[in-house]
Every structure is written in structure tokens, then in C-alpha cells.
Amino acid sequence: MDRARLVSRKRWFPYENGGMSNVRIDKWLWAARFFKTRALAARACELGRIKTNGQQSKPSREVKVGDLLQVINEGGEFQVDVLLLSEVRGPAAVAQTLFRETEVSRELRRKVAEERKAEAQFEPLPASKPSKRDRRVLHRFRGRG
């Protein structure tokens, strides 16, 4: 393997315990792929959707190996243990090595997904598409007309 490819591969690997002691929580959440952008991760912290060891987190809070994070995003509610630290967003396979989801969290997310699936089965479908009059009522209700 040539040197350029080796250097580029090393960049994605997370830091072991000796390499880095702490990282900003917004950078870590972005690197672990809980959020698509760092700005979204920072916003989630400001809205109180991120907790570190039971305490609400600001975006500048430092994350350490061994911390327990509670993360609420569009994918659900996660409880994760921090295993490794990284400031760099890499491939998804590397991001999955940064944390371990707790069994309680995994079970809760599975249960919520099953409930959501069951609700969709019992939701009645409309008999036909809305008439012109119904569409006008909908537009007025939504504030468009």
C-alpha cells in the first residue's frame, strides 16, 4: 500500500485512550453520525435533547471515554456508552466503533418501532381523493387560501 493511501486511512481511525482525552460533544455526535451536520448537533444540545451522565449538555461540553449519553434525534432516543473519541467524520463502519448502545435503549427503540408499525396497519385509507370543495377547505385550514 502506498504512503498516500496509508495516511488517508489513518485519518479516519478514532483516537485510542492515549491519543486524546476529551472532545467537544457536538463534534463527537457529528463524527458518530447521530447528526448530519455539526450545526444540527449543536442545536440539539441547545434544545436539551442531549444529556451527558444525566445532565443537560451545551455544545462545548467535553465528552470522555466512559460517558453515558442520552441522544434524541429524528431516528429515535438512544442511550450510548462512549468507547472511543474522534473529531473527524469518517465512514459509517468507523463511526459505529465510537459507541455502544445500551440494551435498554435498543429494546425501547424496537418496541416503539413495532407500535408505529401496528398503528399504520389500523389507519383507515380514504375512500377516494378529495373533491375540489374538500381541497379548498384543506387549503383554507392550512392557511394557503
Image: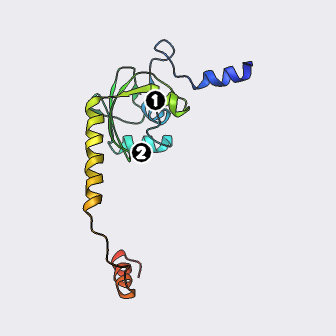
- Which residue bears the numbered disc 2? 43
64 displayed left or right of 111: right
Whole-Å distance between the Cαs marked 2 and 1? Answer: 22 Å
Front in this rendered view, residue 133 or 125? 125
Could you tell which of marks 2 and 1 lies nearer the N-terminus?
A: 2
Residue at position x 73%, y 22% from top? 4
Res. 54 image quadrant? top left
Residue at position x 34%, y 24% from top? 67
Res. 73 image quadrant? top left
- Is there a contact, CB below 8 Å, between mark 2 and mark 1? no
Report the quarter where the C terminus lies: bottom left
Front in this rendered view, residue 145 or 8? 8
Instruction: Say above or below: 142 vs 117.
Output: below
76 displayed left or right of 20: left
Q: Position of residue 21 (x, y in %)?
A: 45, 17
Residue at position x 55%, y 22% from top? 13
15 displayed left or right of 63: right
- Which residue bears the numbered disc 1? 96
